[in-house]
Image (spheres, rainbow, N blue to C red):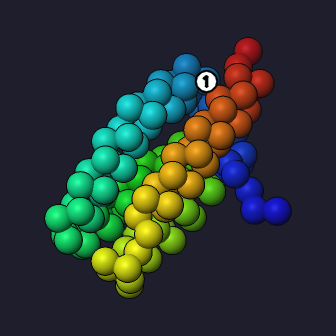
Amino acid sequence: MLEIIDKSYIDEFVGMAGATPFLEAIDLFEKSVNGYISESKNFFAKKMYEESAKEMHKIKGAASSIGLKRIMRDAKTNELEVLDKRENADIDAMIANFKSSISEDIIVLRRYVLTKQK
């Protein structure tokens, strides 16, 4: 089974900075990711495929900063699919699956970080 979160990265971050800054980073990711998704879809609708893919790349980077491994992998896959298939990419299915994974993975991540909080 593929890992959802990068526990060693999270442990190191929380060990150095504490759980509160990490939880704040999760909040920032949640606020930002919906904007990236919306922009990606908007660019796609305008046939601006490179820009759409760049928004997916931003998600990959943001997910990386908080240890969301599955989201990083999915964002990279989506980014490459948009660039490769262009108008034939199924952006609606991609985004629906992505949003579901993001919601699930953030719950897993928060629970994990809270277990590290002392």
Three-letter code, disc 1: Ala
Judged left or right of residue 16, residue 63 is left
Judged left or right of residue 93, residue 108 is right
Judged left or right of residue 59, residue 26 is right
What residue is shown at x 50% (from left), y 61% (from top)? Answer: 93
Mark 1 is surrounded, within 10 Å at the Cα level, by few (under 14), some (14 to 19) or many (20 or more) other residues, namely: many
Query: Quarter holding the C terminus?
Result: top right
| Res 32 quadrant in image | top left
> Is residue 6 in sight in this rendering?
yes
Residue 3 image point, x, y percent: 74, 56
Q: Residue furthest bottom?
A: 84
Query: Quarter holding the N terminus?
Result: bottom right
Residue 29 image point, x, y percent: 44, 37
Q: Residue furthest right?
A: 1
What residue is shown at x 66% (from left), y 32% (from top)? Answer: 107
Which residue is identified by label 1? 19
> Is residue 10 in sight in this rendering?
no
Q: Which secondary structure lies at badge 1? A: helix
What residue is shown at x 65% (from left), y 40% (from top)? Answer: 104
| Res 106 quadrant in image | top right
| Res 54 quadrant in image | bottom left
Residue 62 image point, x, y percent: 43, 48
Residue 103, placed above or below residue 80: above
